[in-house]
Amino acid sequence: MEPSIRTSAPSCRSADDPGISASHALLSPERLAELARELAPGTVARRRDFHRWPELSFQEVRTAGIVAGELRALGLEVQTGLARTGVMGTLRGGKPGPTLLVRADMDALPVDERNGHDFVSQVPGVMHACGHDAHAAMLLAAARILAGQREQLPGNVRFVFQPAEEGPGGAELMIEAGCLDHPTVDAVIGFHIWADLPIGIIGVRSGPLMASSDEVRLTITGRGGHGADPHLSVDAMLVAAHVLVGMQAIVSREIDPLIPAVITFGKAESGRGHNIIAHEAILSGTVRTFDEAVRKTMPQRIERLAEGIASAYGATCKIQYSPQYPVTVCDRQMCELVRRAARSVVKAEDVVEAEPTMGSEDIAYFLQERPGCYFLLGAANPDKGIDKPHHHPEFDIDEDALPIGVQIIVRSVLDFLAPSF
């Protein structure tokens, strides 16, 4: 599917016409499209450079250095070392007005890449398998365009390049470092390359978009022994198996079926030999929901059931529960702003209602503090063989999505700062 980019203005009215927003007077849709196309080769090159040299959470030293250098070259106020490796650039407009924060993440994943293109990861065991390389590249391009409008901007733009979205979470630390202050941020926009949407399709949804995500670790202790004498032991592995099965009753029998919730144990550790009854078993998992009230009850529910099952078999169970990311909730008015911006870039019918996902995102912390929108930028293209999901070793994106994303970011900023908003 080819991207349906709108390259001409929807009408021939002059910028003095009150029906045209102030942002369009600053930068017309056709001029913005032209700038995005001019910057596209550099945006792609920067994305590929980041892709070749991926860095894990809180290790984004090279990436942060490049970002900071480019922002300084644009004349922005730049702060580095926030949340260890985060970068913040502030563009102060020539006229007074509100401040909008736009956020991109920078970290990669511990994945061995299996792609065959010429910009494959050069770091063994590390890969940009989620699109954060594209996020950083697009935000740099958007900063370049907006810096060119500096004197006409009625307000400020804060560009946040955040570390560690993949975990343990850099957004909360960036907020603690003051990225919502001086000047005070009024609203937030974030975005994500999306493998579930075709190139040219933009997903926006007000209200809950992504689930909360918490981590749970259960340590089951029994009594080890010889495999030939099970009656003299308490088999921790057997107890763990019953705990695993029992956990699914929480969602299926204790949670309202109209409230989405997931308990998944993806890692089990136990046993040292084929004829040795395990003394200990450790289960590690994730707990997700869209309902904060349900989320608060999960530790007690899991502990009660796990301890009860373990006790029934003569074992004990210790629970470690670590709250991670809250529910990502998008503001209705900010989502409408982004929808309008997207419709000036692609066809109106290609701006769709995003499906909620049990995936999670730490931009949720920003959206707890300020109204905001987190939109999804389609980048799949089966015709080009680009159809793998996020975190897959063959994950890739259709780079034609990059200028589309840049235009939506810039238009959203201009429309937010415009007095008509």
Image: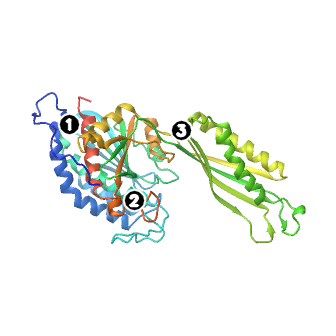
- Amino acid of disc 2: Asp
Residue 405, how many percent across, how many down? Answer: 29, 49
* Residue 92 falls left or right of residue 396: left
- Amino acid of disc 1: Ser
Q: Nearer the viewer, residue 276 or 348?
A: 348
**Which residue is the site of mark 1?**
23
Q: In which quarter of the image is the N terminus?
A: bottom left
Residue 268, how many percent across, how many down? Answer: 67, 60
Q: In which quarter of the image is the C terminus?
A: top left
Between the residue at mark 1 and the residue at mark 2, the CA separation in whole angstroms equals: 36 Å
**Which residue is the site of mark 3?**
290
Foreground mark, 2 or 3, reads 2
Instruction: Return the mark for residue 387.
Output: 2
Crowd rating for badge 2 (residues with CA inside 10 Å; few <14, some 14–19, many 20+)? many
Between discs 2 and 3, the one toward the N terminus: 3
The quarter holding residue 127 reads bottom left
Between the residue at mark 3 and the residue at mark 1, the CA separation in whole angstroms equals: 35 Å
Query: What element does badge 2 sit on?
Result: loop
